[in-house]
Image: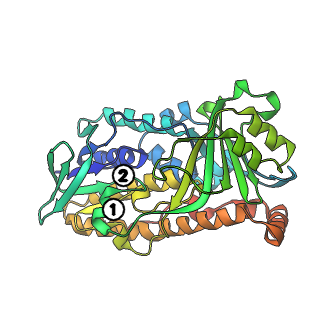
């Protein structure tokens, strides 16, 4: 007898939780507030720690059909264009960590998870279903949607993102805070770019006070580009897909090297995302309480400077499913086990991502030291064994 699980949020974290928990024998009802399942045009990097989880869910072939698998990650100076360091990926990553490093269009990963869920009779996907409130009892959780629907389950998972309503009711710990970093995002077919701007590997261009990351997606046919600059967001900070002023972006890149300026000028259409954040998790209580658990950005929002936001949500989903498999363990105890297994790893990733942002945007002597260290140590600085080896065993 599996558990009855309600999941709030139909993004990557919510779909991953639905897939992992249904594979573990639970019955899932997922509620998404939008009228359709969609993901905006943005890329995702997935380290071997994440790819291993997807492979374990039987998604190797589906992933191979839509992702790209770069052979190396290159770091360059945004000012001079000089190469600062290289991390070997491809076969090297497989040898070290048992799985490749992948880059993928966010919508393709979302669709891949959706397709896998449609094969399960134990999963019910509900659109246009916005959470209003929930109430916990000794034997279950009752949630109410904006349409008046009452749903009872054994537990509730909040996978509803950075501005999570589930978190707001469970923890009431305030709202995320703007970072002063603005992310301009674009995705273009490589065939429309000049040949010298096309690329099949990951490149990170570092500051001062800005950085740009580019990598292939959709089997290498498209190029994803994200340019992060410092500034104040105008408009609704909760919305992450604003129209962008390309003139402002190009002005911000005026002092960068010619190859980077050429890339920025070759792309006409950009979307803007103002980055907001919470402090790193401070304890297991921020991940679960009673019969309610938080997952992904609802539990541990992080800056994208370690490329692990979606990855941590997928790891969360796998760990949660494992913790719920023990039929003799009461639900609240299973969720405590999940929270204890996840909070410290996620807090470490959150802190490292924030630190990376400071390093990427460094100025003055710190920037000089960064570049010198990167040239000297290269791969040793870029590799992250504690992360890519994956989470430890659940105790």
Instruction: Tell me: 359 left or right of 366.
Output: left
Label ID, residue 23 = none
Residue drawn at point x = 15 percent, y = 48 percent:
151
Question: Which of the 4 image quarters holds residue 386?
Answer: bottom right
Residue drawn at point x = 47 percent, y = 47 percent:
239
Please tell me which residue lies in front, 394 or 135.
135
Residue 351 x, y percent position in the rendering = 56, 69
Q: From the image, tell me which residue sits under label 2.
A: 160
Find out whether the residues at labels 1 and 2 contact each other: C-beta distance under 8 Å: yes
Question: Which of the 4 image quarters holds residue 244?
Answer: top right
Residue 238 x, y percent position in the rendering = 45, 52
Residue 358 x, y percent position in the rendering = 68, 66
Q: Earlier in the sequence, mark 1 or mark 2?
A: 2
Q: Secondary structure at mark 2?
A: loop
Q: From the image, tell me which residue sits under label 1.
A: 167
Instruction: Tell me: 104 left or right of 331.
Output: right
Quarter of the figure with the C terminus:
bottom left
Query: Residue 8, can we see it?
Result: yes
Residue 60 x, y percent position in the rendering = 49, 38
Q: Secondary structure at mark 1?
A: helix
């Amino acid at each position: 007898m599996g558990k009855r699980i309600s999941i709030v949020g139909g993004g990557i974290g919510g779909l991953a939780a639905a897939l992992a928990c249904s594979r573990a024998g639970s019955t899932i009802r997922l509620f998404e507030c939008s009228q359709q399942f969609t993901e905006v045009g943005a890329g995702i990097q997935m380290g071997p720690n994440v790819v291993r989880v997807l492979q374990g869910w039987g998604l190797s072939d589906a992933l191979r059909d839509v992702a790209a698998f770069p052979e190396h990650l290159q770091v360059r100076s945004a000012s001079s264009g000089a190469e600062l360091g290289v991390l070997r990926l491809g076969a090297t990553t497989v040898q070290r960590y048992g799985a490749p490093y992948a880059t993928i269009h966010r919508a393709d990963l979302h669709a891949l998870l959706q397709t896998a869920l449609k094969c399960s009779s134990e999963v019910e996907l509900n659109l246009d279903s916005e959470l209003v409130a929930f109430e916990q009892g000794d034997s279950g959780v009752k949630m109410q949607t904006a349409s008046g629907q009452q749903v009872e389950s054994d537990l509730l998972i909040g996978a509803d993102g950075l501005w999570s309503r589930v978190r707001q009711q469970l923890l009431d710990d305030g709202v995320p805070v703007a970072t002063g970093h603005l992310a301009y995002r674009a995705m273009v077919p490589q065939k429309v770019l000049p040949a010298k701007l096309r690329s099949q590997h990951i490149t990170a261009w570092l500051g001062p006070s800005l950085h740009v990351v580019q990598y292939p997606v959709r089997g290498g046919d498209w190029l994803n580009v994200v340019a992060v600059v410092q500034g104040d967001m105008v408009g609704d900070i909760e919305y992450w897909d604003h129209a962008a002023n390309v003139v402002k972006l190009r002005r911000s890149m005026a002092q960068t090297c010619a190859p980077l300026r050429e890339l920025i000028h070759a792309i006409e259409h950009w979307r803007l995302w103002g980055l907001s954040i919470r402090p790193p998790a401070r304890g297991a209580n921020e991940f679960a309480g009673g019969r309610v658990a938080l997952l992904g950005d609802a539990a541990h929002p992080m800056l994208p400077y370690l490329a692990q936001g979606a990855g941590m949500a997928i790891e969360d989903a796998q760990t949660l499913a494992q913790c719920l498999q023990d039929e003799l363990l009461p639900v609240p105890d299973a969720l405590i086990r999940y929270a204890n297994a996840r909070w410290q790893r996620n807090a470490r990733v959150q802190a490292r991502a924030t630190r990376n942002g400071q390093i990427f945007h460094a100025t003055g002597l710190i920037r000089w030291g960064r570049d010198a260290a990167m040239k000297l140590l290269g791969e040793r600085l870029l590799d992250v064994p504690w992360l890519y080896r994956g989470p430890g065993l659940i105790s």
